Protein backbone atom coordinates (compact mmCIF):
# COMPACT_ATOMS: atom_id res chain seq x y z
CA UNK A 1 0.00 0.00 0.00
CA UNK A 2 1.25 3.49 -0.86
CA UNK A 3 0.05 6.67 0.83
CA UNK A 4 0.75 9.85 -1.15
CA UNK A 5 0.17 12.95 0.94
CA UNK A 6 0.37 16.71 0.53
CA UNK A 7 0.47 16.65 -3.27
CA UNK A 8 -1.39 18.99 -5.62
CA UNK A 9 -3.59 16.74 -7.74
CA UNK A 10 -4.30 17.75 -11.35
CA UNK A 11 -6.84 15.53 -13.09
CA UNK A 12 -8.14 16.92 -16.40
CA UNK A 13 -10.74 14.15 -16.76
CA UNK A 14 -12.64 15.24 -13.64
CA UNK A 15 -11.51 18.85 -13.58
CA UNK A 16 -10.14 18.44 -10.06
CA UNK A 17 -7.20 20.64 -9.14
CA UNK A 18 -6.12 20.98 -5.54
CA UNK A 19 -4.33 19.34 -2.63
CA UNK A 20 -5.34 15.74 -2.18
CA UNK A 21 -4.04 12.63 -0.45
CA UNK A 22 -4.18 9.29 -2.26
CA UNK A 23 -4.18 5.73 -0.99
CA UNK A 24 -3.07 3.02 -3.43
CA UNK A 25 -3.52 -0.72 -3.04
CA UNK A 26 -3.42 -3.72 -5.40
CA UNK A 27 -2.87 -1.55 -8.46
CA UNK A 28 -5.86 0.69 -7.80
CA UNK A 29 -6.51 4.06 -6.23
CA UNK A 30 -8.73 3.15 -3.30
CA UNK A 31 -9.10 6.59 -1.72
CA UNK A 32 -8.73 10.21 -2.79
CA UNK A 33 -9.34 12.65 0.05
CA UNK A 34 -8.65 16.21 0.99
CA UNK A 35 -5.29 16.93 2.50
CA UNK A 36 -4.92 15.29 5.93
CA UNK A 37 -8.27 13.49 5.86
CA UNK A 38 -6.70 10.03 5.57
CA UNK A 39 -4.43 10.27 8.60
CA UNK A 40 -6.94 8.78 11.08
CA UNK A 41 -7.84 5.96 8.65
CA UNK A 42 -4.21 5.05 8.29
CA UNK A 43 -3.62 5.11 12.03
CA UNK A 44 -6.43 2.60 12.43
CA UNK A 45 -5.05 0.42 9.64
CA UNK A 46 -1.66 0.40 11.30
CA UNK A 47 -3.09 -0.35 14.73
CA UNK A 48 -1.89 2.94 16.17
CA UNK A 49 -5.34 4.09 17.25
CA UNK A 50 -8.12 1.84 18.52
CA UNK A 51 -10.96 3.07 20.72
CA UNK A 52 -12.32 -0.45 21.29
CA UNK A 53 -9.55 -1.54 23.62
CA UNK A 54 -6.33 -0.59 25.30
CA UNK A 55 -3.60 -2.37 23.37
CA UNK A 56 -1.28 -2.73 26.33
CA UNK A 57 -3.90 -4.55 28.45
CA UNK A 58 -5.58 -6.98 26.08
CA UNK A 59 -3.80 -9.74 24.15
CA UNK A 60 -6.89 -10.25 22.01
CA UNK A 61 -6.68 -6.65 20.87
CA UNK A 62 -2.97 -7.03 20.17
CA UNK A 63 -3.74 -9.96 17.86
CA UNK A 64 -6.50 -8.02 16.12
CA UNK A 65 -4.23 -5.05 15.54
CA UNK A 66 -1.54 -7.35 14.14
CA UNK A 67 -4.07 -8.80 11.74
CA UNK A 68 -5.13 -5.35 10.52
CA UNK A 69 -1.69 -3.85 10.43
CA UNK A 70 -0.45 -3.34 6.88
CA UNK A 71 2.81 -2.17 5.46
CA UNK A 72 2.20 1.36 4.20
CA UNK A 73 4.80 3.31 2.27
CA UNK A 74 4.26 6.98 3.03
CA UNK A 75 5.51 9.46 0.43
CA UNK A 76 5.28 13.14 1.33
CA UNK A 77 4.83 15.16 -1.86
CA UNK A 78 5.05 18.64 -0.37
CA UNK A 79 5.53 21.11 -3.23
CA UNK A 80 4.89 18.52 -5.92
CA UNK A 81 2.06 17.73 -8.30
CA UNK A 82 0.22 14.46 -8.96
CA UNK A 83 -1.22 13.78 -12.41
CA UNK A 84 -2.41 10.81 -14.44
CA UNK A 85 0.46 8.84 -15.91
CA UNK A 86 1.22 10.09 -19.41
CA UNK A 87 0.08 8.10 -22.44
CA UNK A 88 2.17 8.17 -25.62
CA UNK A 89 0.43 6.68 -28.64
CA UNK A 90 3.36 7.01 -31.04
CA UNK A 91 6.66 5.40 -30.04
CA UNK A 92 9.23 3.20 -31.75
CA UNK A 93 10.89 0.60 -29.53
CA UNK A 94 12.54 -1.10 -32.56
CA UNK A 95 11.79 -4.57 -31.22
CA UNK A 96 11.93 -6.98 -33.01
CA UNK A 97 14.57 -6.40 -35.64
CA UNK A 98 16.44 -3.23 -34.70
CA UNK A 99 17.32 -3.73 -31.05
CA UNK A 100 20.73 -2.09 -31.41
CA UNK A 101 18.73 1.17 -31.40
CA UNK A 102 16.21 0.31 -28.64
CA UNK A 103 14.33 -2.66 -27.24
CA UNK A 104 11.13 -3.02 -25.31
CA UNK A 105 12.95 -3.07 -21.95
CA UNK A 106 15.06 0.04 -22.53
CA UNK A 107 12.17 1.82 -24.18
CA UNK A 108 9.99 1.12 -21.14
CA UNK A 109 12.68 2.55 -18.85
CA UNK A 110 12.87 5.70 -20.95
CA UNK A 111 9.09 6.01 -20.86
CA UNK A 112 8.92 5.64 -17.08
CA UNK A 113 11.65 8.24 -16.63
CA UNK A 114 9.57 10.62 -18.74
CA UNK A 115 6.42 10.06 -16.68
CA UNK A 116 4.70 7.71 -19.13
CA UNK A 117 2.78 4.74 -17.76
CA UNK A 118 1.27 3.64 -21.09
CA UNK A 119 2.75 3.62 -24.57
CA UNK A 120 1.50 2.43 -27.96
CA UNK A 121 4.21 0.99 -30.18
CA UNK A 122 4.40 1.51 -33.91
CA UNK A 123 4.46 -1.60 -36.07
CA UNK A 124 7.30 -0.93 -38.54
CA UNK A 125 9.55 -3.56 -37.02
CA UNK A 126 11.26 -6.55 -38.65
CA UNK A 127 9.31 -8.73 -38.90
CA UNK A 128 6.43 -6.28 -39.06
CA UNK A 129 3.47 -6.58 -36.70
CA UNK A 130 1.25 -7.95 -39.44
CA UNK A 131 0.76 -11.43 -37.98
CA UNK A 132 -0.34 -13.02 -34.68
CA UNK A 133 3.12 -14.36 -33.82
CA UNK A 134 4.90 -10.99 -33.90
CA UNK A 135 2.00 -9.31 -32.15
CA UNK A 136 2.17 -11.91 -29.36
CA UNK A 137 5.96 -11.46 -29.07
CA UNK A 138 5.62 -7.71 -28.55
CA UNK A 139 2.75 -7.94 -26.07
CA UNK A 140 4.31 -10.74 -24.03
CA UNK A 141 7.65 -8.95 -23.81
CA UNK A 142 5.80 -5.79 -22.84
CA UNK A 143 4.28 -7.59 -19.85
CA UNK A 144 7.80 -8.07 -18.49
CA UNK A 145 8.26 -4.30 -18.10
CA UNK A 146 6.97 -2.06 -15.34
CA UNK A 147 4.68 0.04 -17.55
CA UNK A 148 1.76 -0.75 -19.87
CA UNK A 149 2.96 -1.69 -23.36
CA UNK A 150 0.36 -1.66 -26.13
CA UNK A 151 0.96 -1.91 -29.85
CA UNK A 152 -0.60 -1.10 -33.17
CA UNK A 153 -0.62 -3.66 -35.95
CA UNK A 154 0.09 -2.91 -39.57
CA UNK A 155 -2.54 -1.77 -42.01
CA UNK A 156 -0.90 -3.69 -44.86
CA UNK A 157 1.10 -6.90 -44.97
CA UNK A 158 4.82 -6.30 -44.81
CA UNK A 159 4.25 -2.54 -44.97
CA UNK A 160 3.99 -2.98 -48.72
CA UNK A 161 0.77 -1.03 -49.25
CA UNK A 162 -0.71 -3.79 -51.39
CA UNK A 163 -2.79 -6.11 -49.20
CA UNK A 164 -4.64 -5.45 -45.95
CA UNK A 165 -3.76 -7.43 -42.86
CA UNK A 166 -6.40 -9.47 -41.06
CA UNK A 167 -7.41 -6.49 -38.98
CA UNK A 168 -10.22 -8.27 -37.16
CA UNK A 169 -7.96 -11.09 -36.01
CA UNK A 170 -5.16 -8.74 -34.94
CA UNK A 171 -7.64 -6.56 -33.09
CA UNK A 172 -9.06 -9.55 -31.24
CA UNK A 173 -5.51 -10.58 -30.27
CA UNK A 174 -4.75 -7.21 -28.70
CA UNK A 175 -3.76 -4.65 -31.33
CA UNK A 176 -5.15 -1.28 -30.19
CA UNK A 177 -4.89 0.46 -33.54
CA UNK A 178 -3.54 0.20 -37.07
CA UNK A 179 -0.75 2.05 -38.87
CA UNK A 180 1.98 1.67 -41.44
CA UNK A 181 3.80 4.58 -39.79
CA UNK A 182 6.84 5.61 -41.75
CA UNK A 183 5.21 4.64 -45.04
CA UNK A 184 2.12 6.46 -46.37
CA UNK A 185 -0.80 4.56 -47.85
CA UNK A 186 -0.82 5.63 -51.48
CA UNK A 187 -3.66 3.38 -52.68
CA UNK A 188 -6.90 5.24 -52.07
CA UNK A 189 -9.14 2.18 -52.31
CA UNK A 190 -6.91 0.25 -49.93
CA UNK A 191 -7.15 3.08 -47.38
CA UNK A 192 -10.91 3.14 -47.74
CA UNK A 193 -11.09 -0.59 -47.06
CA UNK A 194 -8.76 -0.24 -44.07
CA UNK A 195 -10.91 2.48 -42.53
CA UNK A 196 -14.03 0.39 -43.02
CA UNK A 197 -12.49 -2.65 -41.33
CA UNK A 198 -10.93 -0.66 -38.52
CA UNK A 199 -14.28 1.02 -37.82
CA UNK A 200 -15.91 -2.41 -37.39
CA UNK A 201 -13.15 -3.29 -34.90
CA UNK A 202 -13.58 0.08 -33.13
CA UNK A 203 -9.91 0.83 -33.66
CA UNK A 204 -8.30 4.01 -34.98
CA UNK A 205 -6.13 4.20 -38.07
CA UNK A 206 -3.09 6.48 -37.71
CA UNK A 207 -1.40 7.76 -40.85
CA UNK A 208 2.05 9.03 -41.76
CA UNK A 209 1.27 11.78 -44.23
CA UNK A 210 4.11 12.31 -46.74
CA UNK A 211 3.84 11.66 -50.46
CA UNK A 212 7.21 10.16 -51.45
CA UNK A 213 6.72 11.16 -55.08
CA UNK A 214 7.19 14.80 -54.07
CA UNK A 215 10.24 14.28 -51.84
CA UNK A 216 13.83 14.53 -53.02
CA UNK A 217 15.49 14.20 -49.60
CA UNK A 218 13.37 13.24 -46.61
CA UNK A 219 13.85 14.74 -43.16
CA UNK A 220 14.88 18.19 -44.43
CA UNK A 221 12.40 20.97 -45.19
CA UNK A 222 12.44 22.13 -48.81
CA UNK A 223 13.23 25.68 -47.82
CA UNK A 224 16.04 27.36 -45.96
CA UNK A 225 17.44 24.08 -44.60
CA UNK A 226 17.51 22.35 -47.98
CA UNK A 227 19.09 25.42 -49.57
CA UNK A 228 21.76 25.50 -46.84
CA UNK A 229 22.76 21.91 -47.57
CA UNK A 230 22.31 22.15 -51.32
CA UNK A 231 19.64 19.43 -51.50
CA UNK A 232 16.05 19.22 -52.71
CA UNK A 233 14.48 18.34 -49.36
CA UNK A 234 10.87 17.57 -48.54
CA UNK A 235 8.25 20.14 -49.60
CA UNK A 236 5.24 20.96 -47.48
CA UNK A 237 2.97 19.82 -50.32
CA UNK A 238 4.04 16.24 -49.59
CA UNK A 239 2.13 16.42 -46.32
CA UNK A 240 -0.69 18.73 -47.38
CA UNK A 241 -1.80 16.63 -50.34
CA UNK A 242 -1.96 13.42 -48.30
CA UNK A 243 -3.79 15.02 -45.37
CA UNK A 244 -6.36 16.55 -47.70
CA UNK A 245 -7.07 13.22 -49.41
CA UNK A 246 -7.17 11.12 -46.25
CA UNK A 247 -9.43 13.47 -44.32
CA UNK A 248 -11.91 13.37 -47.17
CA UNK A 249 -11.97 9.57 -47.22
CA UNK A 250 -12.24 9.30 -43.43
CA UNK A 251 -15.20 11.68 -43.38
CA UNK A 252 -16.92 9.67 -46.08
CA UNK A 253 -16.33 6.42 -44.18
CA UNK A 254 -17.17 7.88 -40.75
CA UNK A 255 -14.07 6.19 -39.31
CA UNK A 256 -11.58 7.19 -36.61
CA UNK A 257 -8.52 8.68 -38.29
CA UNK A 258 -5.51 10.23 -36.59
CA UNK A 259 -3.11 12.45 -38.51
CA UNK A 260 0.33 11.67 -37.12
CA UNK A 261 3.06 14.21 -36.23
CA UNK A 262 1.47 17.12 -38.09
CA UNK A 263 4.05 19.62 -39.37
CA UNK A 264 2.48 22.26 -41.64
CA UNK A 265 0.12 25.15 -41.02
CA UNK A 266 -1.99 24.07 -44.02
CA UNK A 267 -2.47 20.57 -42.59
CA UNK A 268 -3.51 22.06 -39.24
CA UNK A 269 -6.18 24.12 -41.01
CA UNK A 270 -7.37 21.10 -43.00
CA UNK A 271 -7.86 19.17 -39.75
CA UNK A 272 -9.63 22.16 -38.20
CA UNK A 273 -12.14 22.26 -41.02
CA UNK A 274 -12.54 18.46 -41.11
CA UNK A 275 -13.43 18.40 -37.42
CA UNK A 276 -16.44 20.57 -38.23
CA UNK A 277 -17.74 17.78 -40.46
CA UNK A 278 -16.84 14.71 -38.41
CA UNK A 279 -16.24 13.78 -34.78
CA UNK A 280 -13.92 10.98 -35.89
CA UNK A 281 -10.98 13.17 -36.93
CA UNK A 282 -7.93 13.45 -34.66
CA UNK A 283 -4.42 14.81 -34.88
CA UNK A 284 -1.22 14.55 -32.90
CA UNK A 285 1.72 16.92 -32.58
CA UNK A 286 5.25 15.98 -31.58
CA UNK A 287 7.15 18.19 -29.10
CA UNK A 288 9.90 18.86 -31.62
CA UNK A 289 7.41 20.30 -34.09
CA UNK A 290 6.02 22.84 -31.61
CA UNK A 291 9.51 23.65 -30.32
CA UNK A 292 11.94 23.77 -33.26
CA UNK A 293 12.08 25.02 -36.85
CA UNK A 294 14.28 24.14 -39.82
CA UNK A 295 16.93 26.41 -38.31
CA UNK A 296 17.67 23.53 -35.93
CA UNK A 297 18.64 21.28 -38.85
CA UNK A 298 21.19 23.88 -39.92
CA UNK A 299 22.51 24.03 -36.34
CA UNK A 300 22.37 20.37 -35.28
CA UNK A 301 22.49 18.49 -38.56
CA UNK A 302 21.31 14.88 -38.35
CA UNK A 303 20.25 15.25 -34.71
CA UNK A 304 17.40 17.46 -35.94
CA UNK A 305 16.57 15.42 -39.04
CA UNK A 306 13.12 13.83 -38.80
CA UNK A 307 10.07 12.81 -40.83
CA UNK A 308 8.13 14.93 -41.42
CA UNK A 309 10.81 17.60 -41.21
CA UNK A 310 11.01 20.63 -39.01
CA UNK A 311 9.51 23.47 -40.99
CA UNK A 312 9.08 27.24 -40.68
CA UNK A 313 8.22 29.47 -37.73
CA UNK A 314 4.71 30.03 -39.11
CA UNK A 315 4.16 26.27 -39.06
CA UNK A 316 5.42 25.96 -35.48
CA UNK A 317 3.05 28.71 -34.37
CA UNK A 318 0.13 27.12 -36.24
CA UNK A 319 0.75 23.83 -34.41
CA UNK A 320 0.71 25.66 -31.09
CA UNK A 321 -2.53 27.39 -32.05
CA UNK A 322 -3.96 24.01 -33.05
CA UNK A 323 -3.08 22.60 -29.64
CA UNK A 324 -4.58 25.66 -27.99
CA UNK A 325 -7.94 25.58 -29.80
CA UNK A 326 -8.37 21.78 -29.76
CA UNK A 327 -7.68 21.15 -33.45
CA UNK A 328 -4.75 18.99 -32.36
CA UNK A 329 -5.97 16.56 -29.72
CA UNK A 330 -2.78 14.89 -28.52
CA UNK A 331 0.90 15.31 -27.94
CA UNK A 332 2.80 12.20 -29.04
CA UNK A 333 6.57 11.96 -29.01
CA UNK A 334 7.33 9.87 -32.12
CA UNK A 335 10.22 8.54 -29.99
CA UNK A 336 12.60 7.34 -32.71
CA UNK A 337 15.94 6.06 -31.39
CA UNK A 338 18.95 5.53 -33.64
CA UNK A 339 22.53 4.58 -32.87
CA UNK A 340 25.32 7.17 -32.79
CA UNK A 341 26.95 5.46 -35.76
CA UNK A 342 23.81 5.80 -37.86
CA UNK A 343 23.35 9.47 -37.00
CA UNK A 344 27.03 10.14 -37.77
CA UNK A 345 26.43 9.43 -41.46
CA UNK A 346 26.09 12.32 -43.95
CA UNK A 347 22.83 14.22 -43.67
CA UNK A 348 21.15 12.67 -46.68
CA UNK A 349 22.12 9.16 -45.59
CA UNK A 350 21.44 9.29 -41.85
CA UNK A 351 18.05 8.00 -40.63
CA UNK A 352 15.39 10.44 -39.51
CA UNK A 353 14.09 10.76 -35.96
CA UNK A 354 14.97 11.74 -32.41
CA UNK A 355 14.39 10.26 -28.96
CA UNK A 356 11.57 12.06 -27.20
CA UNK A 357 10.07 10.26 -24.21
CA UNK A 358 12.36 11.81 -21.60
CA UNK A 359 12.09 15.42 -22.77
CA UNK A 360 8.45 15.63 -23.91
CA UNK A 361 6.83 16.87 -20.71
CA UNK A 362 9.51 19.44 -20.02
CA UNK A 363 9.22 20.81 -23.56
CA UNK A 364 5.46 21.03 -23.07
CA UNK A 365 5.97 23.07 -19.89
CA UNK A 366 8.63 25.29 -21.44
CA UNK A 367 7.00 25.96 -24.80
CA UNK A 368 3.28 25.75 -24.00
CA UNK A 369 2.60 26.33 -20.30
CA UNK A 370 5.31 28.82 -19.35
CA UNK A 371 4.58 30.87 -22.47
CA UNK A 372 0.86 31.02 -21.70
CA UNK A 373 -0.56 28.91 -24.52
CA UNK A 374 -1.89 26.05 -22.37
CA UNK A 375 -2.63 25.60 -18.68
CA UNK A 376 -0.85 22.78 -16.89
CA UNK A 377 -4.12 20.86 -16.83
CA UNK A 378 -4.56 21.29 -20.60
CA UNK A 379 -1.03 20.07 -21.24
CA UNK A 380 -1.59 17.00 -19.06
CA UNK A 381 -4.89 16.29 -20.83
CA UNK A 382 -3.15 16.21 -24.21
CA UNK A 383 -0.51 13.87 -22.80
CA UNK A 384 -2.84 11.50 -20.94
CA UNK A 385 -6.63 11.61 -21.14
CA UNK A 386 -7.01 12.51 -24.84
CA UNK A 387 -4.69 9.83 -26.29
CA UNK A 388 -6.08 7.20 -23.90
CA UNK A 389 -9.61 8.02 -25.01
CA UNK A 390 -8.83 7.65 -28.72
CA UNK A 391 -7.18 4.25 -28.21
CA UNK A 392 -9.80 3.06 -25.68
CA UNK A 393 -7.23 2.57 -22.92
CA UNK A 394 -8.13 2.48 -19.23
CA UNK A 395 -5.71 5.28 -18.48
CA UNK A 396 -5.33 9.04 -18.36
CA UNK A 397 -7.47 9.78 -15.29
CA UNK A 398 -7.34 9.63 -11.49
CA UNK A 399 -10.37 8.27 -9.64
CA UNK A 400 -11.24 5.97 -6.77
CA UNK A 401 -11.37 2.45 -8.16
CA UNK A 402 -9.36 3.52 -11.19
CA UNK A 403 -5.85 2.43 -12.17
CA UNK A 404 -2.99 3.57 -9.95
CA UNK A 405 -1.05 4.95 -12.91
CA UNK A 406 0.28 8.38 -12.10
CA UNK A 407 3.20 10.75 -12.32
CA UNK A 408 4.60 12.98 -9.58
CA UNK A 409 6.51 16.04 -10.72
CA UNK A 410 7.90 19.32 -9.49
CA UNK A 411 7.05 22.06 -12.00
CA UNK A 412 9.43 24.51 -10.36
CA UNK A 413 12.61 22.47 -10.47
CA UNK A 414 14.96 22.23 -13.44
CA UNK A 415 17.20 19.53 -14.84
CA UNK A 416 19.89 19.25 -17.50
CA UNK A 417 19.55 16.88 -20.45
CA UNK A 418 22.83 15.01 -20.04
CA UNK A 419 21.89 11.33 -20.21
CA UNK A 420 19.08 9.04 -21.30
CA UNK A 421 17.51 5.84 -20.03
CA UNK A 422 16.93 5.03 -23.70
CA UNK A 423 19.54 2.92 -25.45
CA UNK A 424 20.03 5.84 -27.88
CA UNK A 425 20.81 9.52 -27.39
CA UNK A 426 19.92 11.12 -30.72
CA UNK A 427 18.50 14.43 -29.51
CA UNK A 428 19.09 18.10 -30.35
CA UNK A 429 18.23 18.99 -26.73
CA UNK A 430 21.38 17.55 -25.13
CA UNK A 431 22.91 20.08 -22.75
CA UNK A 432 19.76 22.17 -22.39
CA UNK A 433 18.23 23.06 -19.01
CA UNK A 434 14.61 21.99 -18.81
CA UNK A 435 11.78 22.84 -16.41
CA UNK A 436 9.72 20.16 -14.66
CA UNK A 437 11.37 17.28 -12.84
CA UNK A 438 9.69 13.86 -12.79
CA UNK A 439 10.20 12.51 -9.28
CA UNK A 440 8.01 9.39 -9.39
CA UNK A 441 6.26 7.37 -12.03
CA UNK A 442 3.85 4.89 -10.48
CA UNK A 443 2.26 2.19 -12.64
CA UNK A 444 -0.13 -0.50 -11.42
CA UNK A 445 0.43 0.82 -7.92
CA UNK A 446 4.19 0.19 -8.03
CA UNK A 447 7.02 2.68 -8.37
CA UNK A 448 8.31 2.31 -11.93
CA UNK A 449 10.71 5.24 -11.70
CA UNK A 450 12.06 7.35 -8.85
CA UNK A 451 14.42 10.27 -9.31
CA UNK A 452 17.72 10.01 -7.50
Image (cartoon, rainbow, N blue to C red):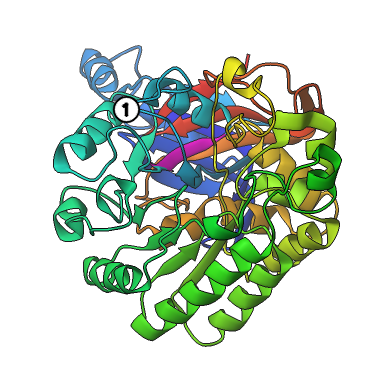
Q: In the displayed structure, would residue 296 be above or below residue 266?
A: above
Give the left or right position of residue 138, taking residue 217 as reference. Answer: left
Label 1 residue SS:
loop
| Residue 377 drawn at (x, y percent) | 66, 56
In the displayed structure, 66 sits above or below 207; it is above
Q: Which residue is drawn at 44% across and 37% down?
A: 23
The residue stretch that appears in magenta: 115-120
Which quadrant of the figure has residue 67? top left
Image spot of residue 247 (x, y percent): 49, 76
Residue 436 placed where, x, y %?
A: 73, 35
In the image, residue 124 lies at what x, y percent? 38, 41
Side (left or right) of 386 relative to 389 = right
Camera-nearest residue between 427 and 439: 427
Is any part of residue 168 visible from this angle?
yes
Does the segment drawn in magenta span residue 396?
A: no
In the image, residue 218 sits, relative to residue 450, either above or below, namely below
Front residue of 60/440: it is 440
Quarter of the picture containing the N terminus is top left
Q: Can residue 46 be seen in this view?
A: no
Where, quadrant-wise, is the C terminus in this rendering?
top right
Decide: few, some or many residues near mark 1? Use Cα within 10 Å; few <14, some 14-19, many ≥20: some
* Most foreground residue, 229 or 138: 229
Taking the spot 38% from the left edge, 62% from the top edge, the residue there is 205
Note whether 74 is above or below 161 in the view shown: above
In the image shown, does 329 or 413 lie closer to the viewer?
329
Q: Is the magenta stretch mostly helix, strand or loop?
A: strand
Residue at x 68%, y 48% (from the top left corner): 309
Q: Which residue was labeled with disc 1?
A: 96
Q: Give the tally of numbered discs.
A: 1
Q: Quadrant of residue 345?
A: top right
Q: Does the magenta stretch include residue 119?
A: yes
Amino acid sequence: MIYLKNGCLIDPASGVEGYRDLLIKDGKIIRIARQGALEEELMLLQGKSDNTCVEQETKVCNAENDRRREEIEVIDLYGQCIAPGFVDVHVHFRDPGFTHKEDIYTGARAAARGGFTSVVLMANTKPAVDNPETLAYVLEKGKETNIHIYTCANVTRGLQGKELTDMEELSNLGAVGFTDDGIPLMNEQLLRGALQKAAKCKRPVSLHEENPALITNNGINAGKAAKHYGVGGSPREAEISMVERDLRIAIEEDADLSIQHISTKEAVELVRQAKKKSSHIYAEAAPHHFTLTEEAVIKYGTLAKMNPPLREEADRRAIIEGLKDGTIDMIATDHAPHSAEEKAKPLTEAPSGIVGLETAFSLGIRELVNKGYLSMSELIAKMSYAPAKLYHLDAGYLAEGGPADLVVFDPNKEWVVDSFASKSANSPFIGETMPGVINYTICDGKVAYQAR
